[in-house]
Amino acid sequence: MAGLKSLAKDTAIYGVSTIVGRFLNYLLVPLYTSKMPAASGEYGILTNMYAIIALLMVILTYGMETGFFRFANKEGNDPVKVYSSILITVGSTSLVFIILCLTFLNPIAGFLGYSEHPEYLGMMFTAVAFDAFLTIPFAYLRNAKRPIKFAAIKMSNILIIILLNLFFLVACPWLSEQFPSLFTWYDPTYKAGYVFLSNLIASVLQIFFFIPELRGFSYTVDRKLMKQIMAYSFPMLILGVAGILNQTIDKIIYPFLFDDKAEANVQLSIYGAASKIAMIMAMCLQAFRYAYEPFVFGKSKEGDGRTMYAMAMKYFVIFTLLGFLGVMFYLDIIKYIIPSDYWEGLQVVPIVMAAEILMGIYFNLSFWYKLIDETRWGAYFSATGCAVIVILNVLFVPTYGYIASAWAGLAGYATVTLLSYFIGQKKYPIAYDLRSIGTYVLLAAVLYVIGEYVPIDHVVLRLLFRTLLLLLFVGYIIKKDLPLKQIPLVNRFIKK
């Protein structure tokens, strides 16, 4: 139980920083969508670019983050030597990436449809190379159980990005009118460009926060050790590429699925903005992941932790289902983070959130093949899921638009989740509490249907009704799995 308390504490720290950080980052969504109307398609450019960035991050880290956790916690290994070897390796590949991309920038921009603005790609490539390198110091902080510094750096980075965006998109237009001679450099039509510039500046500045983690040890590469790490991590690259493609391939290939590129960008703008609402679930998943990965590998050194993994899975499902109901029941309020010309895309929110829940379940399931060093299975699963998503997108998106992309993502994650569960039970059986998990899923589904389809026209009454439904779900959680007397503060109050 102490292990779960430690996991809960770290999840809370990572969670608060992630959720608060993402919330602050959400402030950019209404900013972008207000400055970039849906009909302009400019937000579609951001959506497309950020999808490419996510893919590049996986390629440039090529499983080294997970490899670090595995080998830094492996008996007989020196964690500092593991850290140094991986840091130099990832730093070298990131540098080579920048040089190659900037050398061939114009041909790449032409292929991706950005021949008019190749500098968009130049800024993006440079920023993602810095971010890829810094994933290793971030992993070092997580492994050292230093969530506070981790959270502080993440928050600082987000605040810098927000301030720079506000400067370029809000302050500069006003200042250029008041002091035109001082702002002759400012181009009010260059909105997407200033967004990428903000990200580049923030990524470069972030490295200064890691000066203590980049000093005080010998920079050497243990070649024998790196061969072992590469052998372990390479399947993670395939796994990671396929996994991130499951999340982003629709947004990457979207412009290629339409003859009318302008219409593709308009649809992608709407889909991207609506999906941002569903990304509230991604906050929960990321917070859990940051704490869970070092927790699992740390437990692997103490012996068989299957009972703990099964309990963690159940509480994870409970946690995410509560988040799902919270978002869907208050969508009448949450939708105002984007302008009304984007609201037609809200139909994808429950679909994308359900896909995010399945992605989280798959993430939890995936540790069986990591713990027995058979990571190739992850590559097989994710490649299969990716193939499902790509095929469904190519077949149905040209006819049905972005709604087909949402359903394709759900189908892909359902496929990999089922494959991982059934094969995992043969290779590394874990007694998950399927009955309890199934009951929670069924209850959440029933409450969602009731809240969504009971006709209540008045918005206040509708929100009150849905609040009661949400409290029913919370009450069931308290009754079955979280008695109030187990909560320290409440328990002390009851004793008084």
Image (cartoon, rainbow, N blue to C red):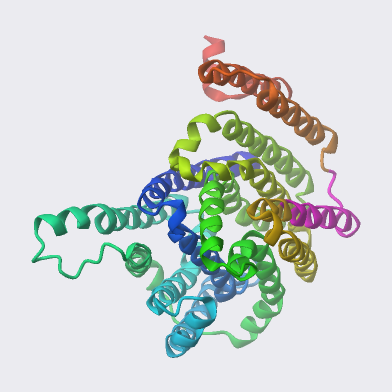
Q: Is residue 410 above or below residue 46?
A: above
Q: Residue at x 39, y 74 (%)?
A: 123
Kindly give the residue lying farthest to the front in the view shown.
260
The picture places residue 461, in percent across and down from the top left corner, at 55, 15
Q: Is residue 29 left or right of residue 11?
A: left
Q: Nearer the viewer, residue 108 or 3?
A: 108
Residue 73 at least partly seen: no
| Residue 419 lies within the magenta run | yes
User: Residues in magenta?
Assistant: 410-431
Q: Does 2 appear above or below 197?
A: above
Q: Residue furthest top?
A: 496
Location of residue 397 (image quadrant)? bottom right
The N terminus appears in which quarter of the rendering? top right
> Percent from the top left, x then y, of residue 471?
62, 20
Q: Is 446 one of the magenta-colored residues?
A: no
Question: What residue sits 78% from the left and 36% below the top?
Answer: 437
Q: Report the number of numbered marks.
A: 0
Task: Name the side, left or right, on which 185 lies relative to 349.
Answer: left
Q: Nearer the viewer, residue 31 or 147?
A: 31
Residue at the image position 21 percent from the left and 56 percent from the top: 173
Task: Return the residue nearer the eye: 88 or 261.
Answer: 261
Quarter of the figure with residue 415: bottom right
> Would residue 367 be visible to someone looking at this image?
yes
Q: Main secondary structure of the magenta part?
A: helix
Rendered view: 459 above or below 283:
above
Q: Position of residue 448 (x, y in %)?
A: 69, 29
Q: Nearer the viewer, residue 369 or 106?
A: 106
358 with respect to 130 (left or right): right
